[in-house]
Amino acid sequence: MNLEQARFNMIEQQIRPWDVLDAHVLDLLSVVRREEFVPQVHRALAFADLEIPLKDDETAIAQGQVMLAPRVEARMLQDLNVQKHEKVLEIGTGSGFMAALLGHRAQRVLSLEIDSGLAATAHANLQRAGVMNVEVRVADGAQANLSADGPFDAIVLSGSVAQLPESMLELLKPGGRLMAIVGDEPMMRATLARRAEAGGWVTTQPWDVVASRLLHFPEPTRFRF
C-alpha cells in the first residue's frame, strides 16, 4: 500500500467533502500518522471510512472499543476549535489517535480510558508519535471524579451517548465547549454545547452520524407495553 497516497485520498475523498475545510485540521491529518494508531491486524483499514475495532472484533464493537471513522474525528476536531492555550478532556482514549490530534492543538490533554490494556497501548502510541502533552488515565469517564482536574476549556466524548451528560457540562469553564454524539440508532446527532458566560448552555446539532456507545453513561428508561 502506498501510505501517503492512501492518506491523501482519505483527506480529499472522505474528509474534505464532509465540510472539513479548516486548513489546520487538514494539515494535521497529514502529519499525525493514523496507521500507527491502528492495531496491526487492521492496518490495511487505517484510511477506510469506517470504525476500526481495537480488540476482538465482536467484543470491541459491542463495548465501543473502536476508532471512529476518520471523517467523524476530523469534523469533531474542527467543530470543537481547540486553541493552543486550552486544557482539554477526552472520554474514550481508544488507540490514542484523537488524543494525538487534540495534543497538537491544545496546551494539555487529559484522556480517560476504561480499559487498562487500551490505555497502555494508547500511551505507547502517543509516546512513539512524540505527543508529550497528553496524559492517558485508566478511569471510567462516566463515573470519574474530575473536580480536581477541571475546569476544562473543551471536552470531547469519543463515542456516542444517549443524552448530554450533565456531569461533563459542569466541568466546562465559562465559554467552554463539549462535543458529543447524542441519540440512539438509527438517528444520532453531533452535538456541540457551549457554556454561556452568564450561565446555562447553548447547544447546536450541526450534523448526523452514528457511532459506537461509550460505556456506563445514563440511558433513558424505555416504556414497554
Image: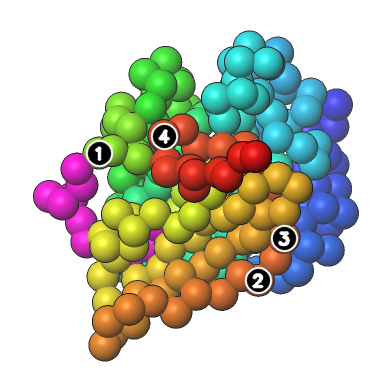
Residue denoted by label 3:
208
Residue 18 seen in the figure: yes
Residue 63 against residue 197 in the figure, above or below: above
Looking at the rendered structure, the secondary structure element under dot 2 is strand
Badge 3 amino acid:
Asp
Residue denoted by label 4:
216
- Secondary structure mostly seen in magenta is loop
Left or right: 106 as drawn, with respect to 73: left
* Disc 4/disc 2 C-alpha distance (Å): 25 Å
Q: For residue 187, which numbered disc appears in the image? A: none
Residue 154 on the magenta segment: yes
Q: Which residue is drawn at the image coordinates 49% and 60% (left, top)?
A: 179
Q: For the magenta stretch, what is the residue range?
A: 145-155
Which callout, 3 or 4, points at the residue further toward the start of the chain? 3
Q: Which residue is drawn at the image coordinates 72% and 60% (left, top)?
A: 208
Left or right: 100 as drawn, with respect to 175: right
Residue denoted by label 1:
144
Residue extending furthest front? 225
Badge 1 amino acid:
Ala
Left or right: 206 as drawn, with respect to 114: right
Q: For residue 206, which numbered disc appears in the image? A: 2
Residue 78 on the magenta segment: no
Which callout, 3 or 1, points at the residue further toward the start of the chain? 1
Looking at the rendered structure, the secondary structure element under dot 1 is loop
